[in-house]
Image (cartoon, rainbow, N blue to C red):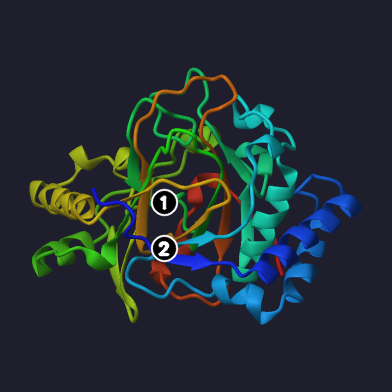
Amino acid sequence: MPTGAVPLRQLAPHAVDELTDTAQKILAEFGSSAARSELLRRIAESAARFDETTLRPCRPVDTDDGLYVLRGLPLEDSDVGPTPGSWATAGDRAAAWDVILLLLATAMGHPIAWEGQQEGRFVHNIVPSPGHEAEQTGASSTVLLSPHTEDAFHPGRAHLLLLACMRNHDSVATTAASVRKVRLDPADVALLSRPVLPILPDDAYTEAQSFAGEAPKIPALWQTQAGPTLRYDPAYTPLDEAPADYRAAYGRLTAELERVSVAVALEPGDVLVVDNDVVVHGRVPFKARYDGTDRWLKRASVRVPGRRTRPLAESDEHGYGQTALVALV
């Protein structure tokens, strides 16, 4: 798996100053609860005033890589405190970064949160947690977090995913693979473009897993004017229920995504921006110490208004009863 083959966008010093100064002013005025409506309104107002130097690196993903790393924001290890033991105990740690991430997210679209995940927070803390080592969620550590599109079970999932690195002493890699780089036989593309199987809610959505409605069948691939897109989460897709030819085609898609996958070891202050319609992401296994020095990311999800990258049939899905909270700009 190659490393380093990821587009880099460098924030200019002026843009860094504008982002960090704005975040500190907002925190001083409103406190550190990034889910409060008045705080979100101020973030939207502030992002609307950013100059072109700040906004230029926030432009849409514009290569077949489907992602880029935004670099230049300063972060000292001593400034963020110890890595929390779980998202539930993170509280307002590194709150300035919650605001910075939401400022960036708002410059790109509408930040979203989920009522059923991390108590409706608009910024999630992604840390290894005791007892969750082998799950297919961000709280795991000892297992490979299988490549997937974020919240693939839901029609209202994000268009963009932002991952900000607070700490990564062990250079634990995020994996990423673009469907725009795979090579598939047209017959496989045709098979995978049919609605054959559902994608079920992952373990981060316990209420959704008990939803009583019938699971909608969805295509794994579809074509847009910009190129192929996908909706993919094999860990929560009941592949054993599919015909043999579909399983074989899905397996070839999986193999191709693995072939083109890159490993991104984020550094503190890096923000990885992922096009969630084009790229699957995951994480390599690692051994958590639970001593306050483990890998720590912050995550924000973004919908891009007016973007047409998804089949119209998705509007009929129930989303397993999960509701997205949208921070309107």
Label 2: which residue? Answer: 67
Residue 329 shows in the view? yes
Amino acid at pointer 1: Ala
Along the viewing direction, whichever of 290 and 293 lies nearer the viewer: 293
In primary-sequence order, the first of circles 1 and 2 is: 2
- Residue pictured at 9% horizontal, 66% vertical: 185
Q: Amino acid at mark 2?
A: Leu
Q: Position of residue 17 (x, y in %)?
A: 73, 64
Mark 2 lies on a secondary structure that is strand
Classify residue 177 by image quadrant. Answer: bottom left
Location of residue 68 (image quadrant): bottom left
Tell me if mark 2 has few (under 14), some (14-19) or many (20+) residues whose alpha carbon lies within 10 angstroms of its own.
many
Left or right of 186? Residue 159 is right
Give the spatial CA distance, label 1 vs label 2.
18 Å
Relative to 6, does residue 224 appear above or below in the rendering? below
Viewer-proximal residue among 205 and 277: 277
- The 10 Å Cα crowd at callout 1, few under 14, some 14 to 19, many 20 or more, is many
Question: Horizontally, is 21 left or right of 5 in the view?
Answer: right
Instruction: Residue at 32%, 57% (x, y): give it.
Output: 218
Which disc is residue 152 wearing? 1
